[in-house]
Amino acid sequence: MKHFRHNMIRAGLEALYYTGAHRVLRPIFSGIGTIFMLHNVRPSRDDSFQPNRHLEVTPDFLRATLKHLRELGIDLVPMDELYRRLRTRDFSRRFACITLDDGYRDNRDFALPVFEEFDAPFTVFVASDFAEGTGGLWWVTLERLIAARSRLEVTIGGNELCLDTATPEAKQAAFDRLHDLLRSLPGADDLAAAMTALCNHYGVDETAVARELCLSWDELRSFAGHPLVTIGAHSISHCLLARQSETVAAHELTGSRGRIQDELQRPVEHLAYPYGDKASAGAREFALAAAAGFKTAVTTRPGMMFAECAEHLTALPRVSLNGHYQDDRLLPVLTSGAATAMWNGFRRVAAA
Ligand SMILES: [Zn+2]
């Protein structure tokens, strides 16, 4: 199913590219600017089972993207400057912000040198439990549990499952099924509890991935001092905020902000909602982010920026630089706004 979706999106991007429709649509849908979303930036791997591949791009693709944006004469600006332009309605020049979620160490080791080449500012959204080394990046843990075994026993929502994970195809099918099952569990703590039980069953330390892949507080302190870097908040535990009580959701926002500010001794004024789709962040979370004092908050809802976004500063859309579509030819399609307009049914703003 996921492959079908990737292929459909890819076909849509290719169609826009080959027909040249993106050139016609650019003046209508390119808006005033774009916030790009990335996660991992690192060299590609050969493994046949890479279920989280959509979350990573290579340094070369990041370089191609920044080169393309520079060639278009687009201003690469930090989130503070985006906020200023929206608040003062300064839309005289098109702009782009580059944002990276979760706080991966590869952002420093592989992305930073590329950003330096282009003198391009960028924002990294940190989940405070990941920096602390106590959080669970369950999607990576699940990948590794499946990669290392030919069979996986798991209890989710009271159902005992025994999944074949012998071949790359079986591993992918098992990952897709478990990923969707875990994300659809209704209770606030169901996902975390199911992963803890699974890790305990196999004797796996579920916090090890955070320490291996994410920047620690010590590392973040020097990283945050780089003139191109802005650090934003990405909640405490990377939970699905919309499933939490209002009190817990509010604490996830204010608590992560407070913790990052204390550790780094600098203001944290921008937020990215974990997951950031409609099921994870809606009107209540947008209001909570504003009440917590964030200047801006970004979702993962696809879209370009339009002047109307100034009225929805805590519900900003982004354009994903997805690992499945790392093709330099398609960059003009992504920056034209035609692709996100297509996904939004040719509505310009998908707020609330
Ligand atoms: Zn995230």
Image (cartoon, rainbow, N blue to C red):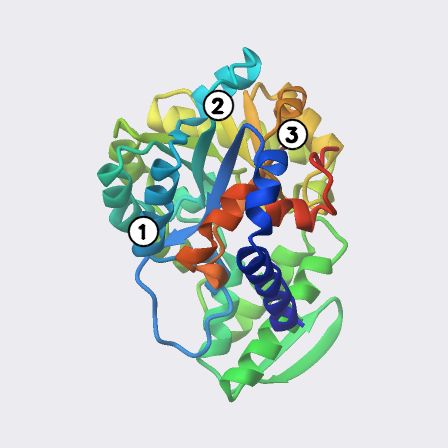
Q: Which residue is mark 2?
A: 82
Identify the residue at horizontal 24%, vertical 33% (top origin). 222
Q: Secondary structure at mark 3?
A: helix
Amino acid type, mark 3: Ala
Q: Is residue 239 left or right of residue 49?
A: right
Disc sitting over residue 138 in the figure:
none
* Image marks 1 and 2: residues in contact by CB distance under 8 Å: no
* Image marks 2 and 3: residues in contact by CB distance under 8 Å: no
Q: Which residue is mark 3?
A: 250
Q: Which residue is mark 1?
A: 106
- Counting from the top left corner in percent of width and height, residue 352 is at 75, 33
Does the beta carbon at disc 2 come under 8 Å from ligand 1? Answer: no
Amino acid type, mark 1: Asp
Identify the residue at horizontal 63%, vertical 25% (top origin). 309
Dot 2 or dot 3, earlier in sequence:
2
Mark 2 to mark 3: distance in Å? Answer: 24 Å
Mark 1 to mark 2: distance in Å? Answer: 25 Å
